[in-house]
Amino acid sequence: MELPTNPLFDRLGVYPLTAFADKARSLRRDGNGPVHDFSIGDPVEPTDQRIRDALKDAVTPTSQYPSATGQPALRAAIATWVMQRFGVEVNPDTQIQPTSGLKEGIFHTPLALTAPGARKHAAIWGAPGYQPYERGALFAGGTSDPVDLVPDNDWKLELDTLTPSRLDQAFIAWLNYPHNPTGAVVDLDYYRTQIATARNHGFVLGSDECYVDIYRPHDTPPVSLLQAADGDLTGLLVCFSLSKRSGMTGYRSGAMIGDERLIAKLGIMRPNIGTASPDFIQAAAITAWGDESHVAARREIFEAKRQVMRAFFDRVGLETSGSQATFYQWVKVPGGDDRAYADALLAKRIIASPGSAFGSAGSGYIRLALVPDVPGCEAACATWEAGITLGEIPS
Ligand SMILES: Cc1ncc(COP(=O)(O)O)c(C=O)c1O
């Protein structure tokens, strides 16, 4: 029998970054020396002990279903963090939806906003960008409307440059600053302009801010769409995650904050899916949102790695673009062929993501996630530099 299959599988292929995870795994298995893996944004620093203890202490003898809307104490902890970080008051009962990691939240949200054949069917997003903006829309029966971002405009998605007919058919536009993969940041005026455009054309403005706490220690912290909203969350959905700020990728814990009509719809839709975080994860999340010292410590760790990489780029004449925040370095590839360059690095057991894996507008760049520790970064730079000297890596 032929297996009934969603045609999207053929159209989309495998999730792009799984290919790199597979490559890294097979290199590690061959035992031919160290692997310098800068491909996936999943750093290896241990999760803070207090967070791990909170999880362990919350494992109860009896196991019961968690609630899809999250524990009141978790929503309160998120609201307190929002107030402390951005000076913005949000209502924990009506404006916050916890998620099982942010990715599922982003992927599932279109189910609440569009349907096959809907008048508002398109998800606008900036390319290069995070794939679930597109994939969530397509699996919900909507369409994807990527907009090419360019370095000359600091990788900003400017909604008001799109035609009115394009904007009118959107159900959502996703912003993502600090930006994956380029590390670009924006200011409050930028957000204000996007809010006005979204409201004029009647679509939700999603702002994925999962890297908002990953910035250089001496820089001014990146701003949030919540600050630009001036107390009015109409049509807005602002998203956060503990994965990057707290090193909790394996816990799966995020938050969506916004228009209470949309949060109510998500509260109706999400129990159908069964994605509620287990209560012991929610306990760990409450501890993580309530502490900034471990986040500051992580920023210092990433800064040390960033300095090693940037000193190396300067030495060998590699240029970065964006790269102001996040733990990514977005590096311009000599010769412009990002896939060939990533392959040349791979031959030296250095794994980087070619920019075109994030959309064709990312071609000409590679993304390096600051995952290896400082000695690991130094070792990778030495290997990379030797490859350049020998003419095995383009310069
Ligand atoms: C831009 C962006 N948004 C959202 C996520 C999802 O984070 P998580 O599902 O781990 O909370 C990621 C993870 O890499 C990301 O890069």
Image (cartoon, rainbow, N blue to C red):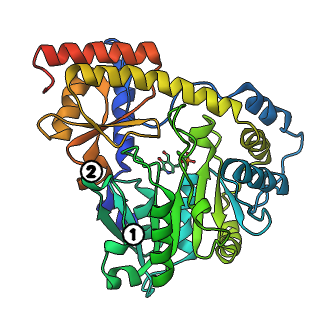
Q: From this view, report whether residue 385 is shown above or below residue 232.
A: above
Is residue 209 in view?
yes
| 268 and 128: which is toward the camera | 128
Is residue 202 in view?
no
Q: Which residue is mark 1?
A: 124
**Identity of the residue drawn at 64% across and 33% down:** 295
Left or right position of 61 against 267: right
What is the x, y in percent for residue 205? Answer: 51, 70
- Split into 4 quadrants, where in the image is the N terminus? bottom left
What is the x, y in percent for residue 365? Answer: 24, 41
Q: Which mark is residue 306?
A: none
Three-letter amino acid code of the residue under disc 1: Ile
| 158 and 219: which is toward the camera | 219
What is the x, y in percent for residue 181? Answer: 38, 45
Left or right position of 315 against 211: left
- Split into 4 quadrants, where in the image is the C terminus? top left
| 189 and 30: which is toward the camera | 189
Q: Which residue is mark 2?
A: 151
Q: From this view, report whether residue 264 is shown above or below residue 280.
A: below
**Identity of the residue drawn at 39% across and 47% down:** 184
Please identify, in this view, whether the residue under mark 1 or under mark 2 is nearer the observer: 2
Q: Answer with mark 1 or mark 2, whichever residue precedes in sequence.
A: 1
**Identity of the residue drawn at 11% across and 37% down:** 335
